[in-house]
Amino acid sequence: MDLKLATIDLGLIAPEIIIAAVAMLILLLGNVVRRRTILAYFGLFGLVAALLTALPRWGNPASGFYGMVQADNFAIFFKIIFIIAAGLTILMARRYLISHEIESPEFYALLLFSAVGMMVMAATSDLVVIFLGLEIMSVPLYVMAAFARHDVSSNEAGIKYFIMGAFASGILIYGIALVYGATGTTDLRRILADWGFFEMHSQLFLYSGAILVLIGFGFKVAAVPFHMWVPDVYQGAPTPVTAFFSVAPKAAGFAALLRIFTYGFADMSQLWAILWILAVLTMTVGNILAIFQDNIKRMLAYSSIAHAGYILVALTAGGDGAVSSAAYYLLAYTFFNLGAFAVITLIDTRNSSTAQIDEMQGLSGRHPFLAAVLALFMFALAGFPPTAGFMGKFYIFSEAIKNGYIGLAIIGVMNSFVSVYYYLRVVVVSFFARPNKEFEAVSYTPAIFIVLVITAAGTLILGILPGYWLSLARAGIFQFL
Amino acid sequence: MSEYLAVLVFLGVGIGMVLFTFFLARLIRPAHPYKAKNQSYESAEKPIGDAWVQFNNRFYIFALMFVVFDVEAVFLFPWAVAFGQLGLYALIEMVIFIAVLLFGLLYAWKKGVLKWV
Amino acid sequence: MELIIFYLAAVVAVGGGLMMIMQRNPVASVLYLIVTLVAIAVMFVQLNAVFVGALLIIVYAGAILVLFLFVIMLLNLRGEKFAEKRTRLDRPTRIILAVAFILELLAMFKQVAFPGRMDELMVQASPDFGGARPVAELLYTKYLFPFELTSILLLVAIVGAVVMARRDEKDKKRGI
């Protein structure tokens, strides 16, 4: 095969190249530059630069590198989510890392590499590239989970995440191998084009492969019954890392899942039953177990499982509308979940903190702004209007009803009601509980303040003016070439 | 397939020669084992404990670096074979690939993990 | 001749695999795994996938299993430490998984004729399909992007390992 230079368009992967180059420079400069602030903001600069190179491609989708790279609206939409998540994490992490004496340039570099992996995952229609992106995303995450090296629970989190993640990758690659065996290609576009043929001749290969792929991603997005690692990892990892975990890898996993199952395997008719069960289990188990948690990081871990369930509802429903509602929800979720974790990071920066919910007692008296934004994020997580959480759930459930999954929508709404209980508990404790002792003050940094303002604004803007953002998400539906 | 017959013969001769020398040595050497002779040689010291000790975790880094550059070598073989047809762009691809890995080596070196003491 | 070599390799591969999981000593398990990998490499060569065969020996048997050995020695795993903890669900789960896997394999053998597209691919394949040159011609053109991604992945692996293995002031104080 000759090399066709026309397909090598570096502009298509410019955001990935910029972020990877910045990450490498941070590693290199880490030995020279003593002031870590410069490195952190250099990382932030790289993310912004990547964002600026990604945005102009909106609306003119292109494919390159022999079809290995798809720079379509869907990819750009998700790239924006990853960049926002990584940027906000850098901003909120510094103070925490410093006060726990674990700051090092590698943290920022690993975070950026992880973001590169996610972007690769979202911007391809080839299963091999999806797998490579997944690994580039995951390896830094394993290390970041164990970043507090002198903390036993952080080590445990790293090991647990690593073992479960490696296991999931193994299952995923086995599934991809079976799909390849059935179709002779890893390109989702060709799989879609010749679906009828493959289904007729090698159905068993194809279906077992697809199910293994689903299981592999099930681990990554924390769907029940593949969720057992989530609470320990979320609790043990350093809090800003948990914040990143709860948002970005989940969005990346769903980007790949949406691309594979609503595009490549769109004609796989019997699969909806499995997705249906997965969605119901994930929502219900996540929400019910969250009720019993006293540690706020653990509670949000189960809450993130439940939110994966809501997005699985959209995946089950299928169709353009459901995909765009899932994309919209992931963007909204990025804002309010990161916001909630930013508040917890701030409180957890005090070394005495154990992140218990009871620790929030007296928060409103001491830090009214912090208590107010925390309440906003909790309302958004629970799905109250006018926050983005409400609109996201509304879109997903109405798409489910539109596509005839009324039972699923009802279960979803009931689950939302259950979730109100444990989210409001945090609000009640921070506003109305009579404190046993005075709330130990936390010190803001400008960076964290910016994070709180951005996430709160995002939560409200997406909730009050959802139409524009949803139309963006809708425009993000794959326009493959 | 038939060209692999040569490989097989090679393999057979290689293994055969080693076995033959062992056999020869067995014929010639005297055999008087006793307890002290069967002990592991520890520079004339009495051996303490057994050979199962916990390795220093720096071994792991070396092994990992070995894997990384082994993979690089595996990528180099086909590249070298097909370089004639692939030409300049393959060269650029490989330079980028190796540059990224060299960067990793440089990083590990700078961090001092390759130093033993 | 080919058939004899194939069956020989198959017996060695399956036997090595069985021995690997039946060993109490993890180091012995790793050594049996190497035997299995070499036998599988022989099969790849028989399938004309020479490059994959060589890769299996160079990377897996040569490098990755060395890494396995080091990790085992690092963790200081001894055979007797593996006290088995079985839950009641353990045995049924194993049986179900094993049966499902065997059924899947059997079903695959039934479909192994690879109708349609696979035949088309096989016809296209040149006689030295699977050698280093055809692999290179694909790897450095069509799979150029995944190829460059692997370098990033390997770099990330190095950085991750260095971060995890690094000793800082606290370690030095504790004399690790």
Image (cartoon, coloured by chain):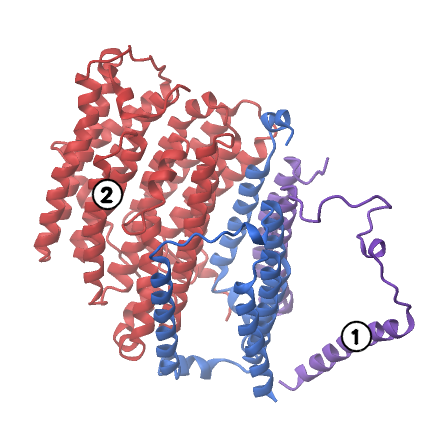
Chain colours: A red, B purple, C blue
- Residue located farthest toward the bottom when viewing the structure as drawn: C1
Q: Is residue A109 left or right of residue A335?
A: right
Task: Look at 41% across and 28% down and name the residue there.
Answer: A93
Q: Are marks 1 and 2 in contact (CB under 8 Å)?
A: no
Front residue of this view, candidates A354 and A442: A354
Q: Is residue C120 above or below residue A402?
A: below
Res B114 seen here: yes
Quarter of the view holding residue A360: top left
Q: Secondary structure at mark 2?
A: helix
Q: Which mark is residue B19?
A: 1
In front: label 1 or label 2: 1
Q: Is residue A120 left or right of residue C9?
A: left
Quarter of the view holding residue A341: top left
Q: Is residue B5 left or right of residue B33?
A: left
Alpha carbon distance from label 1 to label 2: 63 Å
Crowding at mark 1 (Cα within 10 Å: few <14, some 14-19, many 20+): few
Crowding at mark 2 (Cα within 10 Å: few <14, some 14-19, many 20+): many
Whole-percent x and y of residue C89?
33, 57
- The residue at which mark 2 appears reads as A286
Q: Is residue A380 above or below residue C74?
A: above
